[in-house]
Amino acid sequence: MKLCVIGLGYIGLPTSAMFANAGLEVVGVDKKQAIVDALNNGQVLIEEKGLAEFIKNVVASGHLRATTQIEPADAFIIAVPTPIKPDKGSDMRFVKSATEDVATVLKKGDLVVLESTSPVGTVDSLMLPILESTGLKAGRDFALGHSPERVIPGNILYELVNNHRVAGGIDEESADRIAALYKSFVKGEIYKTNARTAELCKLSENTFRDVNIAFANELAKICEAENINVWELIEICNKHPRVNIHQPGPGVGGHCIAVDPWFIVEKEPKLAQIIDLSRHTNDSMPGYTAGRIRGILEGNGIEGRAKVAVLGITYKPNVDDMRESPVIELIEILKGEGYEVAAADPFVGDREGLPSFEDAVTGADLVVLGVNHAQYKELDFEALGKLVKHRLFFDTRNFISREAAEKAGFRYYLLGKKD
Ligand code: SAJ
């Protein structure tokens, strides 16, 4: 069986390799020549645990190659980006053009699967008419549906195989064929349903997390007002067998959780009220965190153009992905308020031309932990104390040992607990 995977990004690339590893003939299609060339040389341009080695072996096996031009195949998987526009509307350009590409080679008996996270109705209202413009009829001549990826960056290879999966078809046969395709490497259960349910299923999973984090962030604000430590509060609440409150922080980033809820709001603006409010709550956190920073500096008598050192700028710990990172927004807000900001990050520092850790913290009036990268767990506060101007530390993730900081003479501040 020949499979064409369109889009060789964080999802399309490892997915292609999984199918190739399972013995299918896989052709990866990407418009970017550099990605295609790298893959054909057995290399990857993205950082993901275990991916480079896996790709090298799979390409060497001869089952996976890449090209910039779509080719006829038995099955097509579309794994292209579905970003949001500045007005929070979905930008479906890439799904549209990938579907148009598939239409140029579509033939009787083929299967077309959308993997990209998409608004409800994308399969039946956007893709189906384009594919049927070939004269072929969906259901009768070709199978069509949605099987969204649900893997977490940082653990993609494990989750691709072991997570449960949803196979949503425009009809039962389409769902059966999608399930059979993924069964070639998926060890989790594959749940068959219709395409619209599969679309909302993916959006609901990420929205559940966004709403839960918004609740945690709201609790953080309430706890600061009520002189309670939100982290202790959540830890104790979560001992209840039916409670699972997520963690507060300086905001929600990434290309999924900070984006997908808007796809529901866009389609059902009057109905999606909690979802909309949660997005706004999470988006308020960089500004709220900046307010805490201002308060800490002023509370310590530091006025004017203070230097703030920020540790970690990626959207979450231990990845090199900066998309929608709330820490970057926090930095922009601080700069806009006239502060001198120096940021360091062990994952993207070199690539982004950031100063070293030492340069960033030297002369700082306040050090802020932005991202809980593993490297920061055992910070040497004695050494840090010698470099900074004022021994002030603000932990936005409840990650650093207050005891270690205070032992070295630092004043330790925590988001979600007002000192
Ligand atoms: N965050 C919090 N508090 C928490 C958890 C996360 O503030 O308790 C923040 C993180 O710091 C980060 C953001 O949320 O900025 C998102 O991180 P994440 O680890 O929750 O999720 P993603 O975006 O890396 O991956 C999510 C996953 N979805 C779910 O867990 C429901 C993943 O399974 C999806 O495949 C992925 O989105 C996607 O591609 O849609």
Image (cartoon, rainbow, N blue to C red):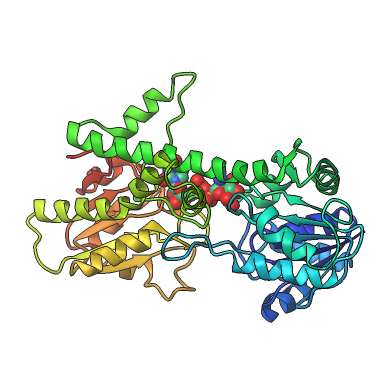
Q: Answer left or right for 270 relative to 62.
A: left
Q: Quadrant of residue 29?
A: bottom right
241, above or below 416, in the image: above
Image height of 33 relative to 168, above or below = below
Q: Quadrant of the C terminus?
A: top left
Residue 51, image x, y percentages: 69, 59
Residue 194 visible in the current orientation: yes
Residue 364, above or below 220? below
User: Residue 164 lies in what quarter of the image?
Assistant: top right
The front one of 61 and 224 is: 224
x then y, percent, for residue 196: 66, 45
**In this picture, residue 216 sits left or right of residue 17:** left
Placement of the N terminus among the 4 image quadrants: bottom right
- Tell whether 256 sits left or right of 137: left
Residue 152 visible, this angle: no
Residue 195, given in percent of the width and then of the height, sits at 70, 46
Query: Percent position (x, y) of residue 89?
Result: 48, 60
Q: Nearer the viewer, residue 398 or 406?
A: 398
Does 172 appear above or below 342? Answer: above
Q: Residue at x 46, y 53 (%)?
A: 258
